Amino acid sequence: MITKEIQVNGTVFRLTLTDPIISQVKNLKSLYNTAYEDPESFEQLSTEISSVIQEISTAIEPKADDTHLDSLIQEIIKTVDDKTAEIKNISSEKIGGKTTRKSRHKK
């Protein structure tokens, strides 16, 4: 679990990132991409997008109102992307570190 402070329009929010919230953020990104690629599907996806946004907003304190929610969701997506990249980078370094070690041969 990760807690991060995000400032939007002068208001500081605390975001608690858990695995389910990270999954919801990834789901939201997928829904946005689908709606962007097929604008006609937006009508069908808008209810699901709204539901996912409401689910993500439960991880925010204090509760965000509509004037902050859009900017806050953008910051949350950026935060999750940054954390995912950081984890991927650390994993790559660990894997790379294991593969670059020279093996010892018996003489």
Image (cartoon, rainbow, N blue to C red):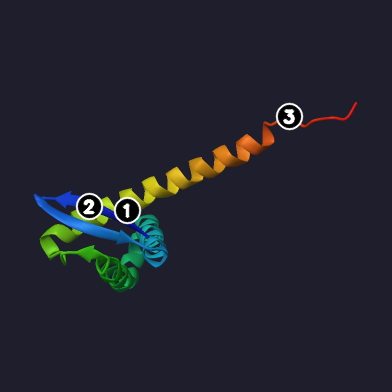
C-alpha distance separating marks 1 and 3 = 40 Å
Residue at numbered disc 2: 5
At a point 42% along the width and 63% down the height, the residue shown is: 19
At a point 25% along the width and 57% down the height, the residue shown is: 73
- Badge 2 or badge 3: first in the primary sequence: 2
- Badge 2 or badge 1: first in the primary sequence: 2
Is residue 69 toward the left or the right of residue 1 in the image? Answer: left
User: Any mark on residue 77, and which?
Assistant: 1
Specify the amino acid type for callout 1: Ile
Mark 2 Cα shell of 10 Å, populated few (<14), some (14-19), many (≥20): few
Is residue 92 toward the left or the right of residue 26 in the image? Answer: right
Badge 3 element: loop
At a point 44% along the width and 44% down the height, the residue shown is: 85
Is residue 57 toward the left or the right of residue 87 in the image? Answer: left
Viewer-nearest residue: 96 or 35: 96
C-alpha distance separating marks 2 and 1 = 14 Å
